[in-house]
Image (cartoon, rainbow, N blue to C red):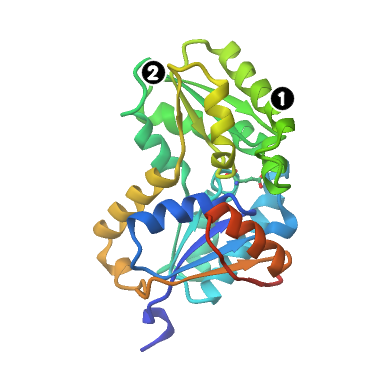
């Protein structure tokens, strides 16, 4: 068998812990494949970094996941999906290996939004990088030109999660602040998307902060269903995924720190390995 046909795990990448919320959704729906998670915790957060830096960091991570045997990599990070995905797909993949695939999470999320909003007014909470890229507005306007999207930058939410302050009373202030800013900008919003994979760790506080009629949407299950459909439509890729039900965790930070925090986020014990990108 050539290296190109040896089955490998599905790679999931995020700047830090946030992609674990995507991994969780995917593993719930598809427990059989092997998975390889990579968190670039040493360089997180990405949300306030420039386009070029997010692109370079993401490309390094994708190459590493390919080197580890992944044929398919999911960018479980909105910031990387917004700023790096297209360039990697169009410029880098053809050179690295045209048979491998890198998928993002913005397009599948937008596809699902159509069935969720009644008012057609959608709010998106995201990192400054995701919101300023206007990726959600652009994707929504292609599929649902009548919908109105309002983005809200939440620069404090990722640091709260990464520093284990998501459940602290201090987080309430910053949750309420960005919720109020979003709903003041468009009071007709009935669907608020957590457009950053870290934010589900704050969901209890976010749900308490929004009015009852506003539904709060996370991406894990949406991305999982979309990936399952993708693999059904691409049997050639499906055949390249190994199926032992395992999951390895790589981090650019200390392995023990990731193991401790990751175990908290996933509510089960995990052992991470430290790598240098
Ligand atoms: N979790 C990532 C996202 O979905 C990025 C968070 C960050 O590193 O700022 O946007």
Q: Position of residue 241 (x, y in %)?
A: 36, 71
Question: Which quadrant of the view contains residue 244?
Answer: bottom left
Q: Residue at x 59, y 59 (%)?
A: 263
Residue 82 vs 120, above or below: the answer is below
Name the mark on residue 173.
1
Q: Residue at x 53, y 55 (%)?
A: 267
Q: How many marks?
A: 2
Location of the C terminus by quadrant is bottom right
Name the mark on residue 120.
2
Q: CA distance from mark 2 to mark 1?
A: 28 Å
Question: Which quadrant of the view contains residue 62?
Answer: bottom right
Q: Is residue 71 left or right of residue 179?
A: left
Q: Is residue 213 left or right of residue 260?
A: left
> Quick check: can you spot residue 134?
no
Name the mark on residue 56.
none
Pointer 2 with pointer 1, Cβ within 8 A: no
Q: Residue at x 55, y 44 (%)?
A: 197
The residue closer to the viewer here, 31 or 268, is: 268
Element class at badge 1: helix
């Amino acid at each position: 068998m050539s290296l190109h046909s040896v089955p490998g795990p599905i790679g999931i990448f995020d700047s830090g812990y946030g992609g674990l919320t995507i991994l969780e959704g995917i593993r719930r729906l598809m427990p059989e494949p092997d998975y390889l998670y990579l968190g670039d915790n040493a360089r997180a957060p990405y949300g306030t970094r420039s386009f070029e830096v997010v692109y370079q960091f993401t490309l390094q991570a994708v190459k590493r996941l390919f080197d580890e045997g992944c044929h398919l990599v999911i960018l479980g990070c909105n910031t990387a999906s917004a700023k790096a995905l297209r360039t990697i797909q169009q410029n880098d993949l053809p050179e690295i290996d045209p048979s491998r695939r890198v998928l993002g999470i913005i397009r599948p999320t937008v596809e699902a939004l159509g069935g969720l909003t009644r008012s057609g007014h959608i709010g998106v909470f995201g990192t400054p990088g995701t919101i300023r890229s206007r990726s959600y507005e652009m994707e929504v306007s292609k599929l649902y030109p009548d919908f109105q999207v309002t983005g809200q930058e939440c620069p404090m939410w990722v640091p709260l999660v990464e520093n284990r302050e998501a459940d602290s009373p201090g987080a309430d202030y910053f949750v309420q602040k960005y919720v109020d800013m979003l709903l003041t900008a468009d009071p007709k919003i009935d669907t608020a998307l957590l457009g950053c994979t870290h934010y589900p760790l704050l969901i209890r506080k976010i749900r308490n902060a929004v009015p009852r009629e506003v539904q709060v949407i996370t991406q894990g299950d949406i991305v999982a269903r979309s990936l399952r459909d993708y693999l059904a439509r691409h049997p050639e890729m499906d055949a390249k995924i190994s199926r032992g039900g395992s999951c390895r965790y790589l981090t650019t930070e200390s392995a023990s720190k990731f193991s401790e925090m990751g175990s908290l986020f996933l509510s089960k014990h995990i052992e991470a390995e430290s790598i240098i990108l």
